[in-house]
Image: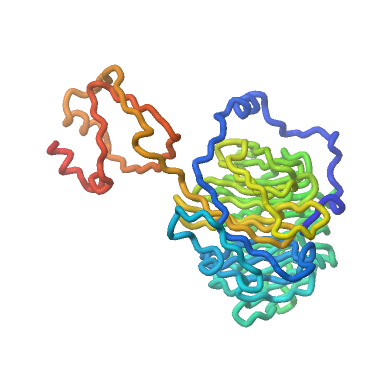
Amino acid sequence: MKNSSSNFPLQNPQQPNTTQLNPDTRQQQQQQEKARCEWDFNLTTVISSSAAGATASDAIGVVEFDPTDNFLATGGIARKIRIYSAEKSFKSRENSEIRAAKFLDHADACEFYICTPAKLSSLKWKPGSGSRVIGSGDYDGVVMEYDLEKRVPVFERDEHGGRRVWSMDYSHWDSTLGASGSDDGTMQMWDPRCDDGGKCLASVQPNRVSRSPVCCVEFNPFGGPIVAVGCADRRIYGYDVRRMGDPVFILDGHQKAVTYTRFLDLQTIVSSSIDGCLMMWHAEDKRVIRTYRGHVNSRRFVGLSVWRNGGLLSCGSENNEVFVYDKRWGQPIWVRGFEPATQRRCEPGFVSGVCWRQTGEERCMLVAGGSDGVLQAFEGVVNTYPLSSYTFGTKEPKMEKDTSVADRLARMKECKKLYLVHLSEREYFAVPKNLKLLAVPLFELYDNVQVRQLS
């Protein structure tokens, strides 16, 4: 369970922000279309502990699916890395009409666990290891790797002077590289193959004046050489791993410490801060694309995950709720109260970690962990509506530029594009009177040049 309020020397809130949104951008955000939820989310699984006293000591700080989406790893205050089988514990329903969630105990749902020497703040699956190796960062400032088949540590690195490691990650551009960010104000890159405890290949201190803690480290998962570093000085620094001198970009817009950064695509970054908002950035242009507000976040790490296929963002909240945002709108599209599995807690709980399964396009799963040690899984399905919800009519004729099909083909070049478009629950389609609306099977749109020339 991460609590940032007592550790970060936050920047003076009176200091001016040099990259405030310009009036046009702010007005566009205020006038944007009202957010709508095109997904039907339902609680499918709840995993908790039935052991007496399993409350704060079981708080979950990080939730991570492996690259294959077959396994889920969790870590936190309990000094354990727990591994769950997605097929066994979070299997999608075969019958979408069944709404009842299943309730499991950690002891039964967990495939196995590995005890760790300290509380965990970060977990990352190592690329190229076949989901066999997982790395961790802990409260004692140590980075470790574990062989999950042998269930033993295989690498240990203690180069942050005992200061807490908030985040660690592996490069997808060069899988031999790892990086960790710490309370000591540095982001260090290292190679676990080195015999001397993971030789430090490079070390940067984003803010050399205040030595602001580094709260999050994220390599570009699309294979580029960029690593994004979020700091307590409310900025995000981007570095090229090939020349770790000065940052290639600085994103300045949050009002308080940046707690998470996630790449949505090659050039788009989503960040979270204890100023209570998420921001989506265009890294190359160094500009804010959109700001997301609704969740409560002023002190703690509440998790951040992006589902790239569906364009959805998720985070926890200090009011014990799970929030989902669509990248197109600044307001949440779905909010769910994280009901505690036990009433033994005296202090209010909060959602402390979230993670999407990245597979699929019309079906998704979100797993969230709470400060009470409970895991909850939510399955989302694209909303579908009956054809009777849509009305078809006509409008004035549309004049053609060409007098014949042959003239049209001579002017046009064939371009094959398929778009998956989400429709509202009810729509009206108006077709020009001189045209026809046809429902065409997809196979008719492929290699049909001969067919169209004869038509």
Residue at 65 percent of width and 51 percent of height: 304
Residue 284 visible = no
Which quarter of the figure is the N terminus placed in? bottom right
Q: Tell me: residue 127, above or below residue 443.
A: below
Question: 128 or 28, which is in the foreground?
Answer: 28
| Residue 343, horizontal then vertical, whole percent | 76, 58
Q: Is residue 131 left or right of residue 231?
A: left
Q: Tell me: residue 344, above or below residue 36.
A: below
Question: 330 or 176, which is in the foreground?
Answer: 330
Q: Is residue 394 left or right of residue 160?
A: left
How has the structure been colored for display? rainbow
| Residue 102, horizontal then vertical, whole percent | 57, 62
| Residue 142, horizontal then vertical, whole percent | 77, 69
Residue at 31 percent of width and 40 percent of height: 415
Which quarter of the figure is the C terminus placed in? top left
Residue 299 visible = yes
Residue at 49 percent of width and 41 percent of height: 38
| Residue 61, horizontal then vertical, whole percent | 72, 60
Residue at 70 percent of width and 44 percent of height: 250
Residue most toward the top? 396
Residue 450 picture quarter: top left
Mark count = 0
Question: 443 or 19, which is in the foreground?
Answer: 443
